[in-house]
Amino acid sequence: MKLVLLICLLFGSLANANDVFDQANASLEAGRYGEAIESYEKLLEEGARVSVLNNLGSAYFHKGDFGRAILAFERSLVLDPGNPHLKKNLEKAQEKAAAYPSDQKTNGFLDFAKISNDGMAKYYLFVALLLPVAAGLFWFSPKWGKLAFVILGINIALLKLAYQPNREKEDPNSRGIVVAKTATVRLSPFEKAEDKGQLPAGREVSLGKLQRGYYWVNSPEIKGWLSENEVEPVIP
Amino acid sequence: MPLLRSFICFVLLSLCSAQGAEVIAQISGNEAEAGAGVLLSVEIKGGKAERPPTFPDVENLIINERGQSTQIGIVNGKMNRSVTYTYVVGSMQEGEYVVPAATMKVDGKELKTQTFKLVVKPSANGAPPGMDGQEGSEKAEATAGDHGYLTFQLGTSGREHVYPGEIAPVRIRAYFPANSRVSLKGNPRPVGSAFTLNNLSEEPQQSRETVNGKQYLTVTWFGGLSATKAGKYPASFELEGQVGTSSRVHGSFFPRMVTKDITLTTEDPPEIEVRELPKEGRPKDFTGAIGQFEFGSLRVPKQLEAGEPTRVEAILKGEGNFSLLREPHPIPQADWKIYDGSSNFTAGDVASFAGEKRFQFNVVPLVPGNRPLSFGFSYFDPDKGEYEIVTSDPQQITITGEASVQTETAQDKEPGDKEPEEPELAPLMMKFGAVRSYVPVAKRGWFLPVTVGSCGVTALLFGFTLWRSRGVDQERLARKANEAASRRAMSKAEKAVSSGDGTSFFMAARDVIRIRVAEQTGVRAEAVTVADLRELESSEISEILNEVDRIGYSGKSTSMENLSDWKATLDRALVKLKESGRKVA
């Protein structure tokens, strides 16, 4: 009985959330951006959805808040990395905010650093799951088993090669987006500390430790402390 | 007589002092970096200057008075007075200069110093292009407060508009009263949110300047001003600091230092229009680079192979936002595959506005042939207000091999080709979708148990397979059986010794020797004959075998005391057998 009640509640809540989503979309299409943003933000409290993040980004974009639009599109791409629509939206918002991604250094032709961390994790998992299969083959036929172990050995060597460039790669958890119209980078984590310069909305920074409500940020132009109200991590 | 001599000396000295007004000019060095200076001192001895030294104007040469000092000394009852004027001489532009002779009037006479040569070299702290002027559009000090004023000069070549993302070089200069003590609380910053200040010089230049006859201590920063959004906004800067000035308190002989917190703001900020980058004519390969750029150099091998990566090195130089300048691409792009490479920027000025960027990357030709090759890139020229496409001089190259993929060479898309008008954003997503997790796969709860469990299962399976294969090893089984038989026979021999049963002892001894020999030769114990044992050339073994024969034929056993000796003989025989076995191995 309790289970039935729980399922009913779950479906009821989902149907309600779906309605809120539809209403938010209608508000956005009607140009009521503030209303749409409020509804999308409320929906995100229940869990992150690609659709909600994409539409939230669009709402911020039309409202002219390109920093938060970029943040929403970046977050939606974390959930759905290969989505071309999301990539395009992000590029448009970056273009509007004049926050083009800076030139990233790469490792040349055989570029393991290009593999996403999730891609690497899935590869690890694939190799790990194949290991018992190879051991099983070895049980039934040592000849085929040996071949399987050689193939796996090559895979493990590739993983070893890819390990260092990926370790050196920026941790996606440390990426942040400037959301304030103009964020002031300070010398120390204090409100009255000397300011070192400004960063515009939408600029991507590398986030360090959080201290007294200030993040240590690192960008190609400037390094220093930025108030947590002015920058948000891509992965919340 | 001594009196006469003293009188003559006095007259001579007096004459000397009347005529001896002299000027000595010294310079601290003949070389200086652009933006820095050398010290020039002009000392007037033995006379009083009616007006301080003056210098004729020399183009681009800056001569700023730094101060004046007076030295008074009494030697042999005679007072000597000298006045020294100090100047900082330098230029913002490199070149060879002649520091002109200073002229002054001393005791009614016109005096002149010698000239000096000064070589001004380029400096890493040099000003960005277009920032060499002394005053430019900087505000005069008409509205200067008691504690100084702030000016700025924007290097936009007379333009009154900028573009989002463009970095316009800016020189910000703060003027403080020369006799004040200044402590800055930070760097200048833009007022409002329309502009950001980037790459501000870490070590501002300091100098002394005279403006309208008033001496100032000046602090100069160079940086890049960037607009964040389109519209019309006033460009203004502010600077916080503390200025201490000395003032004489009533009734006190010594002046007192009075400090005050100040915020200098540029007066009457000019309104700057920030224009959107035009969509019309935007090349497909535009990456956001705004400024003026050109090829510095390009290195491409003349022989290439289709489908094989080839290293290309290109240097792009110019002025602008280098961070958004990407590597040039071969033309037409459809015939090539381009891989991201590495890049390195070398700033040409303190604001990182001018400089050069070196790219190293790989390209893969897809279509073989013998044809000229050009590389290209695009940027937006803010002065012209239009996009520019830059192509390198064509180089004749030969691409061998076969076409690796079918390409759309016929279309020959050039970077300047106009793209069809696109909608602003992708359409809204109408499907609600499922909740997803931001947590990466590697950090999810199940990832570690699954991978570790999988490795564990592999180890178990592998170990069990090895253990199972050990069960069917015939050689190992035979070796183990021999070892057990040897142990049993040895035990039987020992029991026979303790019970005094000579017959049993010798039978057991023969068996032990046979088993040990079988172990060493890798044959079964039953296959080893007495004849084989006799061939071993061991005296101990021969003695034991003879004794076995003797007991067998005579039926008489050995006494109990002798059995212990025979046991020792057996042990020696086994040791020798073992040693001979090792030698054979």
Image (tube, coloured by chain):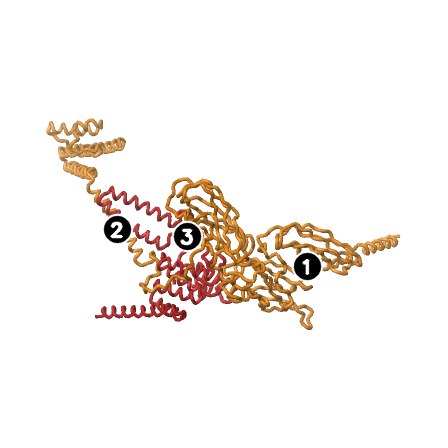
Q: Would residue B169 be seen by someone viewing this image from the given angle? A: yes
For disc 3, the neighbor class at 10 Å (few under 14, some 14 to 19, many from 20) is few
Could you confirm whether marks 2 and 3 are on the same chain?
Answer: no
Front residue (pair B355, B527): B355
Assign a secondary structure to mark 3. helix
Assign a secondary structure to mark 2. helix
- Of all chains in the rendering, the one displayed in orange is B
Which x, y percent locates residue B494? 17, 37
Could you confirm whether marks 1 and 3 are on the same chain?
Answer: no
Q: Label 3 amino acid?
A: Glu
Front residue (pair B575, A125): A125
Q: How many marks?
A: 3
Q: Colour of chain A?
A: red
Q: Residue at x 75, y 60 (%)?
A: B51
> Is label 1 in contact with label 3 (beta carbons under 8 Å)?
no
Q: Quadrant of residue A89?
A: bottom left
Q: Please give the residue where the numbered disc 3 appears in the rendered image.
A: A168
Q: Please give the residue where the numbered disc 2 appears in the rendered image.
A: B457
Say whether disc 1 or disc 2 marks the residue closer to the N-terminus.
1
Depth check, mark 2 against mark 3: the one in front is: 3
For disc 2, the neighbor class at 10 Å (few under 14, some 14 to 19, many from 20) is some
Could you confirm whether marks 1 and 2 are on the same chain?
Answer: yes
